[in-house]
Amino acid sequence: MSPRQSKKITDQVEAEKATWFAPPLAEQKLREFLQTWPLYRRLTFKVAFPIREVSFPRALSMPCSNPACRDEPTTTWTLAQEFSNRPGEMQIYQCVHCSQAEVSFWLVARVSDEVKPAPTAVRPANAVPVYRTASVMKVGQLPGWSIAPPKVIERALDEVNLELYKKGLINMSQAYGVGALGYFRRVVENGVDALLDLVQHAAEADSDAAALEAIREARGKKNAEQKLQLAAEKVPASLRPGGINPLGVLYGNYSRGIHQESDEECLTIATELRDALEYVFGNLREQLEQAKAFRERITKRAGGS
């Protein structure tokens, strides 16, 4: 098979896997891509009109490392410069708050020449009824993509698991999906008993008998996947923000087979698993600890009155 034939097949596969994005969603996804995606991970999408080039957002929302922005969790960054230089193009954004810090992205973007009919169901009203397939990838970023764990994760994990988590981030930064997923799975396996404790505390606060019974059954299992499944099936209401079951998301991504997936597919799973880990081990755990401390203070005051 010639390189040209191989590229054509690759392009066809990417086009089939591409997701439909209406124009506002395309801009949102490109903003997310610039702000959070690591190098070499390709975003492929379809827009329901015949775009000829990828248009990047004019503004981003990210933390700034400048000391002047220390008290700002996130700041607005506006597009300061953009220029093309084969291969790829450079997008440079400047922090609006301090007007000093800059972040640069070296990007390779392409739009297929082929125009296809767009189904009416996904086509924006009054739009031209055709689409092109576009893809974009970061090949460079300055300052580099951060491999520092969030503070909530640093507080939640012990030294061994924090090191595994960092290795997962390092693999993710280079788009090594199989490696990243493997390390994050190890963190889940090592921390499954702590997750059971988390669910038990919430179930006790909610007086959720079904969840407490599921936790008792889970503690009798030796396999981490079985433990996590039982806990995820009976998560109490207080652990379901907006009706979403974070342990269900964690279990779903943990239990997906690592061996039959491609590196790119593993990277997608690893990203979702990382997000679930950060929420469950970090934010959710801190929220429960704060709620527990509050209840204890109120109970103590009530008992002393």
Image (cartoon, rainbow, N blue to C red):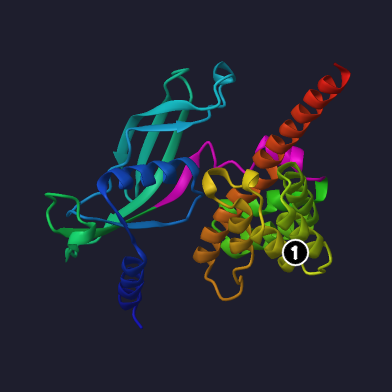
Q: Nearer the viewer, residue 265 or 294?
A: 294
Quick one: which residue is furthest to the bottom in this view?
A: 1
Q: Where is residue 288 in the image (x, y as percent from the top left)?
A: 71, 38
Kind of residue at badge 1:
Lys
Relative to 57, is 222 on the left or the right?
A: right
Residue range highlighted in magenta: 137-158
Relative to 215, is 125 on the left or the right?
A: left
Q: Where is residue 120 in the image (x, y as percent from the top left)?
A: 17, 60
Q: Is residue 278 visible?
A: no
User: Residue visible at 52% across and 70% down?
Assistant: 262
Which residue has dot 1 on it? 227
Q: Which of 117 and 226 is in front in this view?
A: 226
Can you tell which quarter of the image residue 57 is in?
A: top left
User: Residue visible at 68% across and 64% down?
Assistant: 229
Relative to 286, is 139 on the left or the right?
A: left
Please, is residue 7 above or below residue 287 in the view?
Answer: below
Please, is residue 170 above or below residue 228 in the view?
Answer: above
Q: Can residue 246 be seen in this view?
A: yes
Q: Residues within 10 Å of mark 1 (few under 14, many from 20)?
A: many
Please, is residue 5 above or below residue 30 in the view?
Answer: below
Is residue 304 a member of the stretch shown in magenta? no
